[in-house]
Amino acid sequence: MIDAAVKALTQMFTPPFRSVLWRSIGLALVMIVLIGFGLHRLLIWLATMMETWAGGALGPYSDTPIWVLAKIISIAAALGIVVGSVFLMPAITALVASFFTDEIALEVERVHYPSEPPGAPLPVGRALLEGSKAALLAVVIYLVALPFLLFAGFGIVIFFAATAFLLSREYFELAAMRFHSPAEAKQLRKAHQGTVFAAGLLIAGFVSIPVVSLATPLFGIALMVHVHKRVMRQQPLIAKTARPQMSS
């Protein structure tokens, strides 16, 4: 596993990967800005509604306390958006990965597995569907896990484990579906869930690093291409049922 991670990290600095890196970072930043702007406008609207309601309920002598409360809410909203963007980063990178899976996987296969046939490109619709499902599932699980963050250490462990599970599932299946149908990819992941989850822990560690996390799609996909190759050597029968070439 460490060898696969080193190969993935080393290849991230090669010219073909740098091209994908800048595009994936740009797309992730656009998504973060759009989500942040939407959340900011929503919170400001809620604060304004609360201020208006309190003014009507408490009368004209409540202007100063309401103004102070509105400022506190505004500052809390800004901090919440910053913290929220950190927690949403795994979901955002999972969605971004669906746009660049084939470019990343093909380059890894070309460099490290030149004697083996490359995988078939994923249809755009299928890749986006899988990425969207993973992103939405991440948001739901994180909302469920959010109350546990009040219990500092315990909450962080839950959040880290949830991130490892979600990203390992997403990136492995994207890599595996270049060779198998979606059902076969899921079956393969479940058959080797220990190995896949261990790789997911490395990806969760990567995505938890500020700024560096923007490169998670490259590291995650590259790592899972190596993991898929490894488990396929343990599953020779499944290797013979590689899915046929599919058009976008």
Image (cartoon, rainbow, N blue to C red):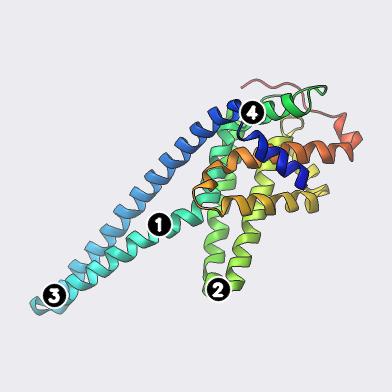
Which residue carries the number 3 mark? 64
Quadrant in the rendering for residue 97: top right
**Position of residue 40 measured from the top left corner of the image (x, y, whole percent):** 32, 54
Would residue 44 appear left or right of 106 to someone viewing this image?
A: left
What x and y, as percent, mark residue 107? 67, 26
- Callout 2, which amino acid? Ala
Q: Position of residue 229 (x, y in %)?
A: 80, 36
Q: Which residue is mark 2?
A: 152
90 shown above or below 13: below
Marks 2 and 1 sit apart, C-alpha to C-alpha, by 19 Å
Q: Pointer 1: what residue?
A: 82
CA neighbours of label 1 inside 10 A, class few (<14), some (14 to 19), many (20+): few
Which residue is at the front of the view, 176 or 83? 83
Q: How many marks?
A: 4
Q: In the visual, does 175 lie left or right of 191?
A: left
Identified at 70% across, 41% down, the residue is: 223
Q: Is residue 106 above or below residue 71?
A: above
Q: Name the residue tied to disc 4.
A: 102
SS assignment at label 4 = helix
Q: Is residue 218 visible?
A: yes
Q: Earlier in the sequence, mark 2 or mark 1?
A: 1
Using the rendered view, name the quadrant where residue 164 is placed.
bottom right
Quadrant (top left, top right, bottom left, bottom right) of the C terminus: top right
